[in-house]
Image: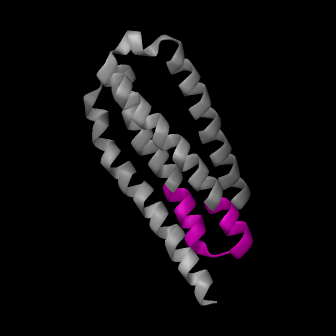
């Protein structure tokens, strides 16, 4: 399980670098400053949570607590839903897709809560 989470973390990080590089080469001029700021928010959250996903995979490999696996999958879902919705809104102007972002945000928050849960359980043992 942790190997799959490591792979997802690497893909999220790699895509974040690729999207950031693409954005640095002219995206702002094509989509406008406000949409670019939204794109940057998605990119920032994606990169933060690629590292959080890596941490969840590492914690799972060390302590084998299910909270870390759940947290890792919540980070994956959050990256896809939150960041994906923001990317879609900025690149396609499909505002309706933006309705997925709050669910992604909740998944990201749930991922952090799972890391706390697993860590607290580890402290008790």
Residue 70 in percent (x, y) is at: 54, 66
Identify the residue shown where x is 65% and y is 35%: 14
* Numbered label tally: 0
Whether residue 90 is visible, yes or no, is yes
User: Which quadrant: the N terminus?
Assistant: bottom right
Residue at the image point whose x is 35% and y is 31% from the top? 38
Q: How is the image coloured?
A: one colour
The answer to whether residue 1 is seen in the rendering is no
The range drawn in magenta is: 56-74
Where is residue 122, by image quadrant? bottom right
Q: What is the quadrant of residue 67 in the picture?
A: bottom right
The answer to whether 55 appears left or right of 71 in the picture is right
Image: 44 above or below 93: below
Does 63 appear above or below 32? Answer: below
Q: Position of residue 62 (x, y in %)?
A: 73, 71
52 or 99: which is nearer to us?
52
Task: State the predominant SS element of the stretch in magenta.
Answer: helix
In the rendered image, residue 80, in percent from the top left (x then y), is placed at 47, 43
Residue that lies at the very extreme toward the bottom in this rendered image: 125
Q: Is residue 89 left or right of residue 48?
A: left
Q: Is residue 30 left or right of residue 67?
A: left
Front position in the image: 41 or 75: 41
> Observer-nearest residue: 81 or 90?
90
The percent coordinates of residue 114 (x first, y second) are 50, 69
> Residue 65: within the magenta?
yes
- Quarter of the C terminus within the rendering: bottom right
Q: Is residue 90 magenta?
A: no
Question: What's the residue at 51%, 54% (across, down)?
Answer: 75
Residue shown at the point (58%, 47%) measured from the top left: 50
């Amino acid at each position: 399980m942790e190997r799959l989470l490591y792979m997802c973390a690497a893909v999220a990080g790699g895509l974040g670098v690729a999207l950031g590089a693409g954005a640095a080469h002219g995206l702002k001029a094509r989509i406008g400053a406000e949409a670019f700021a939204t794109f940057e928010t998605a990119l920032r959250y994606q990169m933060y949570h690629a590292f959080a996903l890596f941490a969840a995979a590492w914690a799972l490999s060390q302590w084998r607590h299910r909270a870390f696996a759940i947290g890792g999958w919540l980070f994956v879902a959050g990256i896809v839903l939150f960041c994906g919705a923001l990317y879609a809104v900025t690149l396609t102007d499909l505002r309706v897709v933006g309705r997925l972002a709050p669910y992604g945000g909740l998944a990201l928050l749930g991922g952090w809560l799972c890391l706390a849960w697993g860590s607290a359980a580890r402290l008790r043992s």
